[in-house]
Image (cartoon, rainbow, N blue to C red):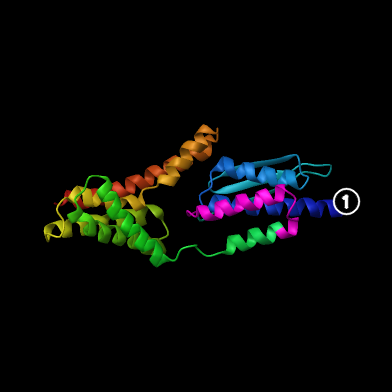
Protein backbone atom coordinates (compact mmCIF):
# COMPACT_ATOMS: atom_id res chain seq x y z
CA UNK A 1 0.00 0.00 0.00
CA UNK A 2 2.80 2.40 0.89
CA UNK A 3 4.56 1.56 -2.37
CA UNK A 4 1.36 2.32 -4.29
CA UNK A 5 1.02 5.69 -2.53
CA UNK A 6 4.63 6.55 -3.39
CA UNK A 7 4.06 5.63 -7.04
CA UNK A 8 0.91 7.76 -7.19
CA UNK A 9 2.80 10.67 -5.65
CA UNK A 10 5.55 10.32 -8.27
CA UNK A 11 2.99 10.34 -11.10
CA UNK A 12 1.43 13.52 -9.73
CA UNK A 13 4.85 15.19 -9.45
CA UNK A 14 5.72 14.40 -13.07
CA UNK A 15 2.35 15.67 -14.31
CA UNK A 16 2.57 18.86 -12.27
CA UNK A 17 6.09 19.61 -13.45
CA UNK A 18 5.10 19.08 -17.09
CA UNK A 19 2.09 21.35 -16.66
CA UNK A 20 4.15 24.00 -14.89
CA UNK A 21 6.77 24.17 -17.66
CA UNK A 22 4.10 24.44 -20.35
CA UNK A 23 1.98 27.04 -18.57
CA UNK A 24 4.95 29.21 -17.62
CA UNK A 25 6.19 29.33 -21.19
CA UNK A 26 3.05 30.14 -23.17
CA UNK A 27 1.13 26.86 -23.42
CA UNK A 28 -2.66 26.99 -23.71
CA UNK A 29 -4.72 25.86 -20.73
CA UNK A 30 -6.49 23.04 -22.56
CA UNK A 31 -3.18 21.75 -23.95
CA UNK A 32 -1.68 21.70 -20.45
CA UNK A 33 -4.62 19.67 -19.10
CA UNK A 34 -4.51 17.26 -22.04
CA UNK A 35 -0.76 16.67 -21.67
CA UNK A 36 -1.07 16.01 -17.93
CA UNK A 37 -3.93 13.57 -18.52
CA UNK A 38 -1.98 11.66 -21.17
CA UNK A 39 1.10 11.38 -18.95
CA UNK A 40 -1.02 10.08 -16.05
CA UNK A 41 -2.70 7.50 -18.31
CA UNK A 42 0.67 6.35 -19.63
CA UNK A 43 1.76 5.59 -16.05
CA UNK A 44 -1.40 3.69 -15.23
CA UNK A 45 -3.43 6.45 -13.57
CA UNK A 46 -6.52 6.27 -15.74
CA UNK A 47 -8.69 8.40 -13.44
CA UNK A 48 -6.96 11.76 -13.15
CA UNK A 49 -8.45 15.22 -12.80
CA UNK A 50 -6.84 18.58 -13.47
CA UNK A 51 -7.95 22.18 -13.16
CA UNK A 52 -5.64 24.75 -14.74
CA UNK A 53 -5.76 28.53 -14.52
CA UNK A 54 -3.10 31.03 -15.62
CA UNK A 55 -1.88 31.30 -12.02
CA UNK A 56 -2.19 27.75 -10.69
CA UNK A 57 -2.63 24.04 -11.40
CA UNK A 58 -4.73 21.58 -9.37
CA UNK A 59 -4.14 17.89 -10.12
CA UNK A 60 -5.46 14.71 -8.52
CA UNK A 61 -5.30 10.98 -9.16
CA UNK A 62 -8.10 8.66 -8.09
CA UNK A 63 -7.54 5.03 -7.22
CA UNK A 64 -8.17 2.36 -4.58
CA UNK A 65 -6.50 4.53 -1.98
CA UNK A 66 -7.85 7.98 -1.02
CA UNK A 67 -7.54 10.57 -3.77
CA UNK A 68 -4.34 12.61 -3.71
CA UNK A 69 -4.63 16.27 -4.77
CA UNK A 70 -1.80 18.76 -5.13
CA UNK A 71 -1.53 22.40 -6.16
CA UNK A 72 1.31 24.23 -7.86
CA UNK A 73 1.41 28.03 -8.05
CA UNK A 74 2.42 29.83 -11.25
CA UNK A 75 3.96 33.21 -10.45
CA UNK A 76 5.99 34.17 -13.52
CA UNK A 77 4.98 33.62 -17.14
CA UNK A 78 6.97 34.20 -20.28
CA UNK A 79 7.01 33.07 -23.90
CA UNK A 80 9.29 30.18 -24.86
CA UNK A 81 7.47 27.87 -27.25
CA UNK A 82 10.62 25.77 -27.59
CA UNK A 83 10.08 24.51 -24.03
CA UNK A 84 6.41 23.82 -24.76
CA UNK A 85 7.45 21.75 -27.76
CA UNK A 86 10.03 19.86 -25.70
CA UNK A 87 7.41 18.96 -23.07
CA UNK A 88 5.17 17.63 -25.83
CA UNK A 89 8.10 15.56 -27.09
CA UNK A 90 8.74 14.15 -23.60
CA UNK A 91 5.02 13.40 -23.25
CA UNK A 92 5.07 11.39 -26.48
CA UNK A 93 8.09 9.42 -25.24
CA UNK A 94 6.23 8.67 -22.01
CA UNK A 95 3.16 7.50 -23.94
CA UNK A 96 5.40 5.24 -26.03
CA UNK A 97 6.84 3.68 -22.86
CA UNK A 98 10.35 4.99 -23.49
CA UNK A 99 10.78 6.81 -20.17
CA UNK A 100 10.36 5.68 -16.60
CA UNK A 101 8.89 8.06 -14.02
CA UNK A 102 12.34 8.93 -12.68
CA UNK A 103 13.77 9.54 -16.17
CA UNK A 104 10.79 11.68 -17.18
CA UNK A 105 11.03 13.80 -14.03
CA UNK A 106 14.75 14.37 -14.54
CA UNK A 107 14.24 15.43 -18.16
CA UNK A 108 11.44 17.80 -17.21
CA UNK A 109 13.46 19.22 -14.32
CA UNK A 110 16.44 19.77 -16.62
CA UNK A 111 14.16 21.52 -19.12
CA UNK A 112 12.61 23.69 -16.41
CA UNK A 113 16.04 24.82 -15.20
CA UNK A 114 17.31 25.68 -18.66
CA UNK A 115 18.05 29.33 -19.24
CA UNK A 116 16.41 31.20 -22.10
CA UNK A 117 17.28 29.79 -25.49
CA UNK A 118 18.34 33.18 -26.81
CA UNK A 119 20.45 35.69 -24.92
CA UNK A 120 19.11 39.17 -24.19
CA UNK A 121 21.32 40.86 -26.84
CA UNK A 122 19.96 38.42 -29.44
CA UNK A 123 16.39 39.16 -28.40
CA UNK A 124 17.10 42.90 -28.47
CA UNK A 125 18.49 42.78 -32.01
CA UNK A 126 15.59 40.60 -33.16
CA UNK A 127 13.01 43.00 -31.66
CA UNK A 128 14.75 45.99 -33.26
CA UNK A 129 14.87 44.42 -36.72
CA UNK A 130 11.28 43.21 -36.38
CA UNK A 131 10.19 46.78 -35.63
CA UNK A 132 11.70 48.00 -38.87
CA UNK A 133 10.10 45.15 -40.80
CA UNK A 134 6.70 45.90 -39.26
CA UNK A 135 7.07 49.51 -40.38
CA UNK A 136 7.59 48.39 -43.97
CA UNK A 137 4.67 45.95 -43.66
CA UNK A 138 2.40 48.81 -42.61
CA UNK A 139 3.33 50.75 -45.77
CA UNK A 140 5.97 52.90 -44.10
CA UNK A 141 8.86 54.54 -45.91
CA UNK A 142 12.31 52.99 -46.09
CA UNK A 143 13.61 56.33 -44.81
CA UNK A 144 11.96 55.48 -41.48
CA UNK A 145 13.35 51.94 -41.28
CA UNK A 146 16.34 52.74 -39.05
CA UNK A 147 14.40 55.16 -36.79
CA UNK A 148 11.87 52.35 -36.23
CA UNK A 149 14.70 49.89 -35.56
CA UNK A 150 16.21 52.20 -32.93
CA UNK A 151 12.84 53.06 -31.33
CA UNK A 152 11.75 49.41 -31.25
CA UNK A 153 15.07 48.32 -29.76
CA UNK A 154 14.84 51.09 -27.18
CA UNK A 155 11.31 50.03 -26.27
CA UNK A 156 12.28 46.37 -25.86
CA UNK A 157 15.29 47.30 -23.73
CA UNK A 158 13.09 49.59 -21.63
CA UNK A 159 10.36 47.03 -20.96
CA UNK A 160 12.97 44.53 -19.76
CA UNK A 161 14.80 47.05 -17.61
CA UNK A 162 11.69 48.61 -16.06
CA UNK A 163 10.28 45.15 -15.35
CA UNK A 164 13.37 44.37 -13.28
CA UNK A 165 12.97 47.61 -11.33
CA UNK A 166 9.20 47.35 -10.86
CA UNK A 167 7.95 43.78 -11.53
CA UNK A 168 4.49 44.96 -12.61
CA UNK A 169 3.79 44.36 -16.29
CA UNK A 170 1.39 47.28 -16.70
CA UNK A 171 3.92 49.89 -15.54
CA UNK A 172 6.87 48.44 -17.46
CA UNK A 173 4.85 48.30 -20.69
CA UNK A 174 3.46 51.79 -20.12
CA UNK A 175 6.93 53.25 -19.56
CA UNK A 176 8.40 51.31 -22.50
CA UNK A 177 5.74 52.64 -24.88
CA UNK A 178 6.34 56.12 -23.44
CA UNK A 179 10.04 55.76 -24.34
CA UNK A 180 9.10 54.60 -27.85
CA UNK A 181 6.87 57.66 -28.29
CA UNK A 182 9.64 60.00 -27.13
CA UNK A 183 12.20 58.41 -29.46
CA UNK A 184 9.81 58.54 -32.42
CA UNK A 185 9.03 62.22 -31.80
CA UNK A 186 12.75 62.96 -31.41
CA UNK A 187 13.59 61.28 -34.71
CA UNK A 188 10.86 63.15 -36.58
CA UNK A 189 11.74 66.54 -35.09
CA UNK A 190 15.44 66.11 -35.87
CA UNK A 191 14.69 65.08 -39.44
CA UNK A 192 15.86 61.48 -39.07
CA UNK A 193 12.28 60.24 -39.51
CA UNK A 194 9.33 61.41 -41.58
CA UNK A 195 6.12 59.57 -40.59
CA UNK A 196 5.58 59.62 -36.83
CA UNK A 197 2.59 57.26 -36.86
CA UNK A 198 4.35 54.58 -38.91
CA UNK A 199 7.45 54.67 -36.71
CA UNK A 200 5.34 54.31 -33.56
CA UNK A 201 3.21 51.48 -35.00
CA UNK A 202 6.24 49.49 -36.12
CA UNK A 203 8.12 50.06 -32.87
CA UNK A 204 5.36 48.95 -30.48
CA UNK A 205 4.64 45.69 -32.32
CA UNK A 206 7.22 43.65 -30.30
CA UNK A 207 5.28 44.65 -27.18
CA UNK A 208 1.86 43.64 -28.51
CA UNK A 209 0.53 40.53 -26.66
CA UNK A 210 -0.20 38.47 -29.77
CA UNK A 211 0.35 35.06 -28.17
CA UNK A 212 -1.75 36.04 -25.16
CA UNK A 213 -4.69 37.07 -27.36
CA UNK A 214 -4.41 33.88 -29.40
CA UNK A 215 -4.34 31.67 -26.29
CA UNK A 216 -7.31 33.56 -24.80
CA UNK A 217 -9.41 32.90 -27.89
CA UNK A 218 -8.34 29.24 -28.11
CA UNK A 219 -9.10 28.66 -24.43
CA UNK A 220 -12.54 30.25 -24.81
CA UNK A 221 -13.27 28.06 -27.84
CA UNK A 222 -12.15 24.99 -25.85
CA UNK A 223 -14.60 25.88 -23.05
CA UNK A 224 -12.06 27.14 -20.50
CA UNK A 225 -13.99 30.31 -19.76
CA UNK A 226 -12.10 31.45 -16.65
CA UNK A 227 -8.67 31.06 -18.25
CA UNK A 228 -9.83 32.59 -21.52
CA UNK A 229 -11.38 35.62 -19.84
CA UNK A 230 -8.40 36.18 -17.52
CA UNK A 231 -5.92 35.98 -20.40
CA UNK A 232 -8.13 38.28 -22.44
CA UNK A 233 -8.20 40.78 -19.57
CA UNK A 234 -4.41 40.60 -19.27
CA UNK A 235 -4.06 41.20 -23.01
CA UNK A 236 -6.45 44.15 -22.78
CA UNK A 237 -4.45 45.71 -19.93
CA UNK A 238 -1.24 45.28 -21.93
CA UNK A 239 -2.80 46.92 -24.99
CA UNK A 240 -4.17 49.72 -22.81
CA UNK A 241 -0.75 50.30 -21.24
CA UNK A 242 0.89 50.53 -24.66
CA UNK A 243 -1.78 52.90 -25.95
CA UNK A 244 -1.66 55.05 -22.82
CA UNK A 245 2.11 55.47 -22.98
CA UNK A 246 1.95 56.62 -26.60
CA UNK A 247 -1.06 58.84 -25.90
CA UNK A 248 0.78 60.70 -23.12
CA UNK A 249 3.60 61.59 -25.52
CA UNK A 250 1.33 62.54 -28.43
CA UNK A 251 -0.92 64.67 -26.21
CA UNK A 252 1.99 67.05 -25.53
CA UNK A 253 2.79 67.65 -29.22
Give 99 or 46, whichever is nearer the viewer: 99
- On screen, residue 252 versus residue 65, left or right, reads left
Q: Position of residue 74 (x, y in %)?
A: 56, 53
**Residue beneath the point at 31% across and 49% down:** 242
Q: Which residue is mark 1?
A: 1
Q: Tell me the crowding category of disc 1: few under 14, some 14 to 19, or many 20 or more residues within 10 angstroms, Cα based.
A: few
**Residue beneath the point at 36% across and 59% down:** 126
Q: What are the residue bounds of the magenta stretch?
A: 77-103
- On screen, residue 11 versus residue 108, left or right, reads right
Q: Position of residue 97 (x, y in %)?
A: 75, 50
Outermost residue on the right side: it is: 1
Give 152 or 167, whichever is nearer the viewer: 152
Q: Main secondary structure of the magenta part?
A: helix
Examine the structure image and report whether residue 149 is included in the region drawn in magenta. Answer: no
Helix, strand or loop for disc 1: loop
Work out whether residue 248 can be spotted.
no
Q: Quadrant of residue 112?
A: bottom right
Q: Position of residue 218 (x, y in %)?
A: 50, 37
Q: Position of residue 42 (x, y in %)?
A: 74, 46
Amino acid sequence: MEKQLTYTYDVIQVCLLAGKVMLQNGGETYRVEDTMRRIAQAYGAANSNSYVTPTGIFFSVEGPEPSKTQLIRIIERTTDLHKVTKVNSISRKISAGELTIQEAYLELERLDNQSERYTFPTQLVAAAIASGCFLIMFQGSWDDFFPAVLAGGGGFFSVTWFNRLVPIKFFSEFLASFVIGLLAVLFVYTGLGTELDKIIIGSVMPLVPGLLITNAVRDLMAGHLISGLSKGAEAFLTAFAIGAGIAVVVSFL
